[in-house]
Each structure stands twice: as C-alpha cells, then as structure tokens.
Amino acid sequence: MLEFDPSAEIQALRSTFSDIAAVVDVDSLRAEIARLSEDAGAPDLWDDVEKAQKVTSALSHRQSELKRLTDVEQRLDDLDVLIEMAIEMDDEDTAAEARREIADLQDVIGQLEVQTLLDGEYDARAAVVTIRSGAGGDDATDFAEMLLRMYLRWAERHKYPVKVMDTSYAEGAGIKSTTFEVDAPYAYGTLSVEAGTHRLARISPFGGADKRQTSFAAVEVIPVMEEAKEVEVPEGDIRVDVFRSSGPGGQSVNTTDSAVRITHLPSGIVVSMQNEKSQIQNRAAAMRVLQTRLMLLQKEQEAATKKELAGTITASWGDQMRSYFLYGQQLVKDLRTGYEVGNPAAVFDGDLDGLIAAGIRWRKRKDDD
C-alpha cells in the first residue's frame, strides 16, 4: 500500500500562492496588459521610436510577470491530478514524480514570494550591472570575469535576456570591468542586493605554489531609467572619447572607431559603451547610463544629508558583502545575512537564488526597523 499524503504541502503551497496573487493584484496586472496591448497596436506607434520601445518593453515585462503566475497556477492544478493518479494506481514512480514537482514548486513559489518584497521605487525595472576588478592583480581580474559568468549563468537559468554593453579586458587574465543589462521584470530589485564589494580567497593559479591570494571586485547595480533624460548634463561637464572596440588580446570587434567613453568631469563618473555598431548609438546608450548614475548619486547625497542632520550616519551595507573561499573549507558566505553555501562551484555556475533571497529578506527587515 502506497504511503503518500502530501495534502499538507499542497495546502501550504496554495495558501502562499494565493497570498502572492493578492499582493501582485492579478486583475490589475491583466488590465495593465490590455492597456499596453492597445497602445502597442496603435498604427502610429513607431513614429516615435523611443516611446514605442518603452511601450513594448513594459508590455513584455508585464506579460512575463503574468505568465510566471499563470504557469504556477497551472502546475498546481496538474499536480493535483498527478497525486490523484499516484494514489488511485498505487504507483510509487508516479508518487516520486509528484514529490519532485512539489519540491520544485516550493522553490518557484518561494522565489515569487520573495519578489513580493520588492516594493522599492525602482525595483520593478530592468537592471544595468557593472563589475570592476579591485586589488589583487591577475587574481582580481580573473575574479571579475568569474563574477560576470556567474551572473550570466544566473540570468540564463531564469531565461532573462542579457546584453553585454561594454567589456574592458585585462592584459593578463580576466577583465578589468564589464557592464551588462538584464532586461527582466524586477531585475533591479532582485540584483540590487548583489551590489557591493565581493572578496575571493583561494590558492592563486597565477602565483607561487600553495600561495593563498585574496582579491576583490566591486559590483554596481542601477535601474534602467527611461526618464533619465530629466537629469540635465551640460556639454561642458563631459569629455567624450572615441576608440576602437576590442576583445580579448586586443582583437578588433568593429573595424570602425565606434566605441564611446564619456567622463563626467565634476563627479569623475566614467561610462563606456561598445556593444552597438554605431558611434551615435553607443553615445546615446552611455548617456542614458550616465544620467541614471547621476540621478541616483543625487538621491544618495540627499539621503546622506538627511542622515547627517538626524545624527545617524552609518556605513553603507554594500561594503564587502560577500566572501568566496576556494581553499580548505569550500564556502560562500554573505557577511550581511550570514547565509552560507558549501558549494562555491554551484554558486559560480549561477546558483544564486538562495543568496539573493536571503539578501532581499535581510534588506526588507532592515528597512522596516
């Protein structure tokens, strides 16, 4: 006789999913999709390319969000049928399949539940991520490339579109810096907890035998801001340099000098773009990122001033937020949340959901205090 009664797990899954649907407000989401679909179907939509891109991107994001919810709802219904079959047929193989589906749905619904905590002003937006190597020589530039692959694999696991916008390769191993965009709903809210200084400790493959090396890389995450043009940047405040796009070892990507580097002289912020084929497109993309960074910098300065006036100046939580140990005890540890993973190889292969979820919950608790 088959011993299989997952009713408690199913009830818990349906209860959690019902709470998620209520927070998301599926009816309002469907109404917004209908409105955006009507806008997207307007015959003169593409007369204004920028507006058209904004409408189609918003529509794609909302449709993707709704699909995640409807897919889970359908899987819950299918799971009921699978469980009923297992019990009626007294079949252990079918029961095992149902157990695997329950475990997978617990993971998926857990991720959706975490998403409901993303209620910040820009959390629902796509994200632009920049990784910069820090102290540590070849180990640091290699570490920066490892982090790039880690985030690209994470995005691939979730089927999130990614566009690498710029990469500066190191003379030795790895990369000096890279910037890429993750175009998915809530990408900024999700990835923003990855911002800060990451530290790698390992036996260096570039130094002497058994020499332990500690290296660092910085991760910056900003939202994609359609309205960033509201930030005025006088021409006299920027220096624009044009150069030839290049790949590893100096290999030419484009045969024209299409890559653009914009330096904002008052703040020292530097933005480079080389993904697009034309200089004009690269300059426009670089300006959008620069304007967003300036807007966020302004908000940070205003927040810091308010804290100073209130007498509660604190260090940023983003400083040295995670350590990766690849010698002795294999471990990845988030220094803010205390969350640990004993399999660094899986983390570097994109298995970040546990670390990210812990970071989002930690940030929500911190904001509520």
Image (cartoon, helix red, strand yellow):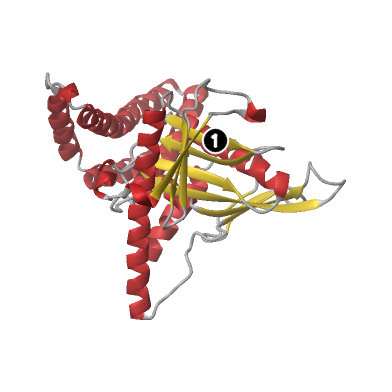
| Residue 100 is at least partly visible in this image | no
Q: Nearer the viewer, residue 128 or 191?
A: 128
Q: Is residue 317 above or below residue 91?
A: below
Q: Nearer the viewer, residue 342 or 319?
A: 319
- SS class of the residue under badge 1? strand
| 200 relative to 155 in the view: left or right | right
Residue 124's quadrant in the figure?
top left
| 205 relative to 227 in the view: left or right | right
Which residue occupies 50% across, 27% down?
A: 257
Q: Which residue is mark 1?
A: 167
User: Whole-percent x and y of residue 35?
Assistant: 13, 31
Residue 182's quadrant in the figure?
top left
| Residue 253 is at least partly visible in this image | yes
Q: Residue furthest right?
A: 209
User: Whole-percent x and y of residue 64?
Assistant: 30, 30
Which residue occupies 47% across, 23% down?
A: 94
Q: Which quarter of the rendering shows the C terminus?
A: bottom left
| 314 relative to 23 in the view: left or right | right
Q: Nearer the viewer, residue 343 or 250?
A: 250
Q: Nearer the viewer, residue 184 or 293?
A: 293
Which residue occupies 41% across, 59% down?
A: 363
